[in-house]
């Protein structure tokens, strides 16, 4: 198959060994070709226009602004971009927020080997793909009477909430997301109001209860 007919892919993960593992899996697919790699969301955003990949496979947990913000920025600048999240997080909240940010699919790394090729083809066909484990958890969540409080947050609010419960200072959040300190403070106030929490301790407890961090 000629290079023109191959599916072009960009890999975004801060661990080179992970990118190499994904590349090895994709090398087994005769209709796919990795055209670019990036070790951060910032770098992915910088080089996206040079390659304009058919699909981008992106991790969420990376130094710097992280995958969630990276998705938002890439999609804002390149509305037709198709991004498939490949994450260690199987929590439904992460998948929901990634889709809110503009991702077209979400796959847990635990299902990488058996689902990746199908997920790529699915997303490129114009459909939204959810990995088996994540889809089951979302279905279970929808069947419960109590809604996930994280659904109240926007993708940006969710990312800031995660940084806050990780103990990241407001100034660092502002620098990482390229927004003002006042804007971060306003987000913090809005997040507390939406989630009904009043202190950092309550925020951490809620994050633990929602399965976002371990106790």
Image: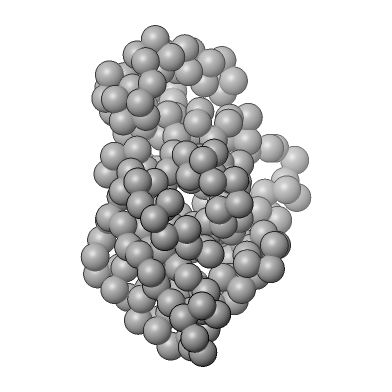
Q: Is residue 104 visible?
A: yes
Q: How many numbered badges does the structure rendering display? A: 0
User: Quick one: 11 or 115, which is closer to the camera?
Assistant: 11
Q: Nearer the viewer, residue 110 or 47?
A: 47
Residue reaching furthest to the left: 16
Measured as percent of width and height from the top left, residue 127 is found at 70, 62
Residue 41 visible in the shown view: no
Vertical order, 9 against 28 (above or below): above
* Residue at position x 56%, y 23% in the image: 195
Reply above or below: 110 against 172: below
Left or right: 131 in relation to 40: right
Query: How far across and down, in percent of the image, does residue 83 sit?
Result: 53, 56
> How far across and down, in percent of the image, does residue 158 sit?
50, 33
Quadrant including the C terminus: top left
The front one of 157 and 205 is 157
Residue at image location 68% in from the left, 68% down from the top: 125
Residue shown at 44% from the left, 29% from the top: 161
Q: Quadrant of residue 27?
A: bottom left
How has the structure been colored for display?
one colour
Answer left or right for 100 relative to 169. Answer: right
Q: In the picture shown, does residue 152 fall above or below 92?
A: above
Vertical position of residue 5 compared to residue 140: above or below: below
Residue shown at the point (34%, 38%) measured from the top left: 65
Q: Nearer the viewer, residue 53 or 85?
A: 53
> Measured from the top left, where is residue 66 in percent x and y?
37, 43
């Amino acid at each position: 198959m000629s290079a023109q007919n191959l599916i072009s892919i960009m890999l975004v993960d801060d661990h080179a060994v992970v990118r190499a593992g994904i590349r090895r899996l994709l090398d087994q697919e005769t209709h796919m070709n990795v055209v670019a790699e990036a070790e951060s969301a910032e770098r992915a955003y910088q080089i996206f226009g040079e390659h304009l990949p058919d699909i981008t496979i992106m991790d969420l947990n990376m130094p710097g602004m992280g995958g969630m913000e990276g998705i938002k920025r890439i999609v804002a600048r390149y509305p037709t971009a198709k991004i498939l999240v490949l994450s260690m997080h199987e929590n439904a909240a992460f998948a929901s927020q990634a889709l809110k940010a503009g991702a077209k699919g979400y796959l847990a790394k635990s299902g990488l080997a058996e689902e990746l090729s199908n997920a790529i083809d699915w997303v490129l066909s114009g459909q939204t793909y959810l990995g088996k484990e994540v889809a089951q958890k979302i279905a279970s969540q929808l069947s419960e009477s109590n809604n996930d409080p994280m659904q109240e947050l926007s993708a940006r609010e969710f990312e800031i909430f995660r940084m806050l419960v990780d103990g990241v200072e407001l100034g660092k959040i502002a620098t990482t997301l390229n927004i003002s300190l006042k804007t971060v403070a306003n987000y913090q106030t809005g997040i507390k109001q939406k989630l009904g929490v009043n202190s950092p301790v309550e925020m951490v407890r809620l994050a633990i209860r929602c399965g976002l961090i371990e106790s």
